[in-house]
Amino acid sequence: MVAALESQAEASNASSLTPITIEMKPLHNSQNGEQFLQSTTKDPVLRDGRAGTEEVELGIRDACQPPESAVNALQQWNNPRINMWRVFACCWSFFIAGGNDGAYGALIPYLETHYDLSYTVVSLIFLSPFVGYSLASLLNNAVHVKFGQRGVAVIGATCHLTTYVVVCTHPPYPVMVIAYIVVGFGNGIVDAAWCAWIANMVSGNQVSGFLQASYSLGATIAPLIATAMITRAGWPWWTFYYFMVGGSAIELAVSTAAFWKQTGEVFRMENPRDPNVKVGRTREALSNRLTWIFAIFVLGYVGAEVSLGGWIVVFMTKVRSASKFDSGMSATGFWAGMTVGRLVLGFATEKFGERLSVIIYLALAVGLELIFWLVPSIVVSAVAVAFLGFIFGPLFPTATVLLTKMLPKHLHVGSIGFATAFGGSGGAIFPFIVGAIASAKGVKVLQPVILALLALISALWLMLPRLPQKDHKAEAGKRAQKFWSWLGWERENRSPRNGMDGI
């Protein structure tokens, strides 16, 4: 079914578009001696510029293979200007998704009491989104090909809004479980789409860091608001979802407006395929080994992240004997640390490179997890888990950026989409596993599960192949330039750029 949708959409596109001609002319910058290409398009940032004049006739249709000499242009977060609005829409969508995931930990004790549930049964709200994530991993590419980013914006936000309206009515628990299947599909489809789009931008580490920081910010604020509403104001737990209804309504309006022109036809034009490939995009992506390595990496990473964020309140209450308010603040500290880590460490990652940076982050995470597990102190545990969040922060956006460098562009949505959606199901599976084991052994089992997941993703990261040497050197030479370009400043004279800096 997925392949049929993709084939139908791509076939309809092949007969509706005509070739266009783009003339590219070399220009010389007298200040820093670099050569630039000026074209009739509005994208000034190029992955590879050349001297000489050439006309490239582009038959922009999926049936045509781009010429080997074609220049691969990267978008910026602020160019074209509509991208600023779109990046904001993506960040707001991630903020809502983070609020959804971050609230679990604060609400679990009250769900247990309200519905009179065991750890295993209450953990179903972690497991049910797995079904939605799995559907998203299979349908994400087909949605892009058929409806484009517009379809992603509308479907994802509608899933969020529908779920939160249902939860506000505090329905029977089985209805809650079904509703979270819908929210899992919404999270999976926007997670995959916006990660793939932003990771392929100029200064992808930094911009992806801000995107993921939006998720972490939502996950930071959600338990804080939920805990304060329940413990301080004395309101019932479901009133928290009134805020989520308002936030997802804004998401629907903003995302739809921002991506309205990004239809399926536009997506197929911007992501042409090799005509010799006879299988659908999703199948082609799934046949790539990197897709599966990255998917399992994300599965383990998100499983560790959401397990910690979801069960830390119960762990601090039952094992460390902390008060409910202090336990809720520990969860807030974890997500706040993740927010700061994603904002700050993206710059360090850009300096040292994705591969080495993640190795360092994982080594530090293992050390902090051992401290959290073995030192029986409320204060030490709270501090250790906050720093764990800080180190966890850049892992996912960094891995996404590295994958975009390893794969051809037409596979980005398929591979990253499948990997993030399928891998995101780890946020459903492993918290459920922790809850199921905790029913028999106690919630102290959280720590060895987290440590095992860290060992798994460390091994997977070391399995990733290195970038080709020439690409590696080129990336190292461009990091500083990309940093200043991202800020809108030239590196040589530190003066603001105006257009193409006086060209």
Image: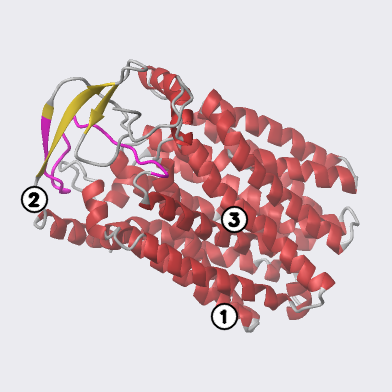
Pick the residue in front: 438 or 192.
192
Q: Quadrant of residue 230?
A: bottom right
Q: CA distance from mark 3 to mark 1?
A: 22 Å
Quadrant of the image containing the N terminus: bottom left
Which residue is rendered at x = 29% and y = 39% of the image?
43
Q: Earlier in the sequence, mark 3 or mark 2?
A: 2
The kind of secondary structure element at disc 3 is: helix
What number is the disc on residue 166? 1
Which residue is rendered at x = 18% and y = 47% of the image?
278
Q: Earlier in the sequence, mark 3 or mark 1?
A: 1
The kind of secondary structure element at disc 1 is: helix
The spot of residue 6 in percent (x, y) is 24, 58
Q: Residues within 10 Å of mark 1 (few under 14, many from 20)?
A: some
Pick the residue in front: 426 or 349.
349
Q: Which residue is mark 3?
A: 427
Q: Amino acid at mark 1?
A: Val
Q: Which residue is mark 2?
A: 18
Q: Magenta segment range? A: 55-78
The spot of residue 470 in percent (x, y) is 36, 17
Left or right of 363, for residue 322: right
